[in-house]
Image (cartoon, grey):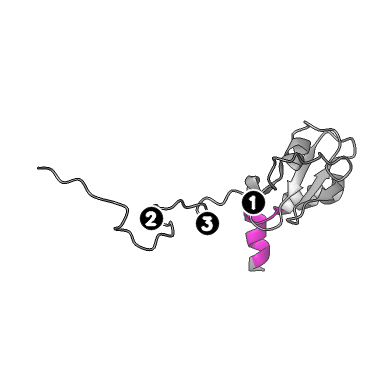
Amino acid sequence: MIRFIIRLITWWNSQTLGTQIYTWRKGQKVGEDPEGNKFYQTKDGKRRWIVYKGNIEASRISPQWHGWLHHTFDQPPTEDPLPMKAWEKPHIANMTGMPEAYAPLGSLRGKRKDLTRDYIPWNPE
């Protein structure tokens, strides 16, 4: 019962009950990305939306799916994938605030063994 109430009133854990009912009634599944997010559209193709797997975080969507969601591309990446250029890296989600976030050497989270060897503090005369 508690799970139903949480699902009814929260939107940040997958989809709300209203979105699920709308998806059942009018949604046509178009595809799924490697993270398990599912993409839908209405039968006429005018509305497009995503049902996230897990927490909702917009940076988890690849550029190809983002372009399809915003009507930049007519065909979804499952039907007409964009070729990757040689200089492109695979898509990764934004890791800010997570343990996997980038931390350069010398930062508070950076991996530096001895903090006193490469820094000489300024002393006034």
Question: Residue 79, which numbered label?
Answer: none
Marks 1 and 3, Cα distance to the nearest angstrom?
Answer: 15 Å
Tell me which numbered mark, 2 or 1, is placed earlier along the sequence: 1
The residue under label 1 is which amino acid type? Ile
Disc 1 target residue = 56
Please state which of residues 76 and 44 is positioned toward the viewer in this rendering.
76
Q: Does the magenta stretch include residue 75?
A: no
- Residue sitting at x 42%, y 57%: 109
Give the image location of residue 31, x and y in percent. 84, 49
Element at label 1? loop
The residue under label 3 is which amino acid type? Met
- Residue sitting at x 71%, y 57%: 53
Disc 3 target residue = 98
Q: Does the magenta stretch include residue 13?
A: yes
Give the image location of residue 15, x and y in percent. 70, 53
Residue range in magenta is 3-16
Q: Residue furthest bottom?
A: 1
- Residue sitting at x 84%, y 51%: 24
Please state which of residues 61 and 119 is positioned toward the viewer in this rendering.
119
Element at label 3? loop
**Which one is closest to the eye, mark 2 or mark 1?**
2
The N terminus lies in which quarter of the figure?
bottom right
